[in-house]
Image: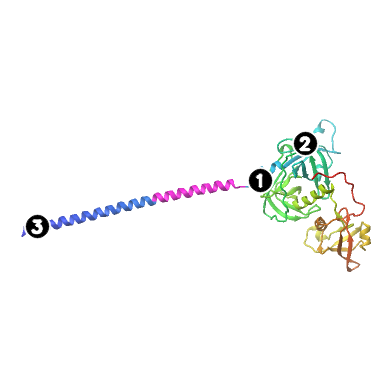
């Protein structure tokens, strides 16, 4: 009995050992499989992290490459020139006379050598030299000035130049939009210097006959006549003036593209700007002069043409509107008259002796505000198209 019982116990023990050993083996196998799974998961995670890091690096690199400013400067710079010469009436005698120079900038608008710049850059210059971005020098062969807008067209004997692309209008620009200025600041050796900034304001009426673009782009003496460029590589305006005083920083102004185009079209067609004129001298209100918002009319201070007198306009009358367009400053009239031509009949709403009256006036030719009859100038030849 004992033998059988012992034998049975031994059999059970062997069976238990076998079962326990199998269980252990199964657990080991399961553990081994889990370890493999965890290892694979870890490897996959490492690959994902590496892939994400690489993608982030590529994105950062792509972001750096996508900055448009360097490429825009590279593309537009060949269309920008430096202009240098001696100013008549300020020439000095002696050895220092050769250093008595003034300079500015310009923008190529036609491949055959036509360049737009400021009138104050080339006015009264002698022995003027234009230098293109590739270092070639040219003399000016033709000059057409319009002091009223401070713009001028000049011509050099060159071909296959790269003209800049002029924006259709600056009215679509936005305050805060990034812009670039290219020009010849301070020294003529610094030709094609570039600065960046943003548009600070639009439609400014500071010390100019037309509305201007204000930007905080660094503008220095010599930048006059150079381009203000948008992020499409278009010339948004021609840099013309800046505020310069102690405590004043980065307040430059450019003539908008639509005004530049208007003046160029007139100069190419007539060799001058044939502006319509009311034949009146007008004065804005105090509020208008100091920049306050106002709807106050303009006051007639002098009647300068027979046409205006014939229309019944007298000194002391006030002008509210022209053809339904409210005008509160002379700049309003100048902007409006870019769409008008001499000889057109306009309808003026005015106040005379306390009464609101309508005057019909035939526009003369001359300054839009001052003058009219007898102000036509002779044509001295027309620029080439």
Whole-number angstrom distance, CA of label 3 to CA of label 1: 99 Å
Q: Which residues are magenta?
A: 42-67
The first of marks 3 and 1 along the sequence is 3
Q: Helix or strand or loop: what does disc 2 sit on?
A: strand
**Badge 1 density bin: few <14, some 14–19, many ≥20, Cα 10 Å:** some
Question: Is residue 192 found left or right of 38 in the rendered image?
Answer: right
Farthest residue to the top: give it: 95
Foreground pick, 248 / 193: 193
Quarter of the picture holding the N terminus: bottom left
Visible in this render: residue 244? no
**Badge 3 density bin: few <14, some 14–19, many ≥20, Cα 10 Å:** few
Residue that badge 1 annotates = 72
**Badge 2 density bin: few <14, some 14–19, many ≥20, Cα 10 Å:** some
Q: Position of residue 70 (x, y in %)?
A: 64, 44
Residue lying at 92% horizontally and 54% vertically, measured from the top left: 373
Visible in this render: residue 1? yes
- In the rendered view, how is the structure colored? rainbow
Q: Position of residue 34 (x, y in %)?
A: 32, 53
Query: Is 337 inside the magenta-drawn segment?
Result: no
Foreground pick, 209 / 363: 363
Name the dominant secondary structure of the magenta segment: helix
The first of marks 1 and 2 along the sequence is 1
Residue that badge 2 annotates = 138
Badge number at residue 6: 3
Farthest residue to the front: give it: 385
Question: Is residue 42 found left or right of 64 in the rendered image?
Answer: left
Whole-number angstrom distance, CA of label 1 to CA of label 2: 26 Å
């Amino acid at each position: 009995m004992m033998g059988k019982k012992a034998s049975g116990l031994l059999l059970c023990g062997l069976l238990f050992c076998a079962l326990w050993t199998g269980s252990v083996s199964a657990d080991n196998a399961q553990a081994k499989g889990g370890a493999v799974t965890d290892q694979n998961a870890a490897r996959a995670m490492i690959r994902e992290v590496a892939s994400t890091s690489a993608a982030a690096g590529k994105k950062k690199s792509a972001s750096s490459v996508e900055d448009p400013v360097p490429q825009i400067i590279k593309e537009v710079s060949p269309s920008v020139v430096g202009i240098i010469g001696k100013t008549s009436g300020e020439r000095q005698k002696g050895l220092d006379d050769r250093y008595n120079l003034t300079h500015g900038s310009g923008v190529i608008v036609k491949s055959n050598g036509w360049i737009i710049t400021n009138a104050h850059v080339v006015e009264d210059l002698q022995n003027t030299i234009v230098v293109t971005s590739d270092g070639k020098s040219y003399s000016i062969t033709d000059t057409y000035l319009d002091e009223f807008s401070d713009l001028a067209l000049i011509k050099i004997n060159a071909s296959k130049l790269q003209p800049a692309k002029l924006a259709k209008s600056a009215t679509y620009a936005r305050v805060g939009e990034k812009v670039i200025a290219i020009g010849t600041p301070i020294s003529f050796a610094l030709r094609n210097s570039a600065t960046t900034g943003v548009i600070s304001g639009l439609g400014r009426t500071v010390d100019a006959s037309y509305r201007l673009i204000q930007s905080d782009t660094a503008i220095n003496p010599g930048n006059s006549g150079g381009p203000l460029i948008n992020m499409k590589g278009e010339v948004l305006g021609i840099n013309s003036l800046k505020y310069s005083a102690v405590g004043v920083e980065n307040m430059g102004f450019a003539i908008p593209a639509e005004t530049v185009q208007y003046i160029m079209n007139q100069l190419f067609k007539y060799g001058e700007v044939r502006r319509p004129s009311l034949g009146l001298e007008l004065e804005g209100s105090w509020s208008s002069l100091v920049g306050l918002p106002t709807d106050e009319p303009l006051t007639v201070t002098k009647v300068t043409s027979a046409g205006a007198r014939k229309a019944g306009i007298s000194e002391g009358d006030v002008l509210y509107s022209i053809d339904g367009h409210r005008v509160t400053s002379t700049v309003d009239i100048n902007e409006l008259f870019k769409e008008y031509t001499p000889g057109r009949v306009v309808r003026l709403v005015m106040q005379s002796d306390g009464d609101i009256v309508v005057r019909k006036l035939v526009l003369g030719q001359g300054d839009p505000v001052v003058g009219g009859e007898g102000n036509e100038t002779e044509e001295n030849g027309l620029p080439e198209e």
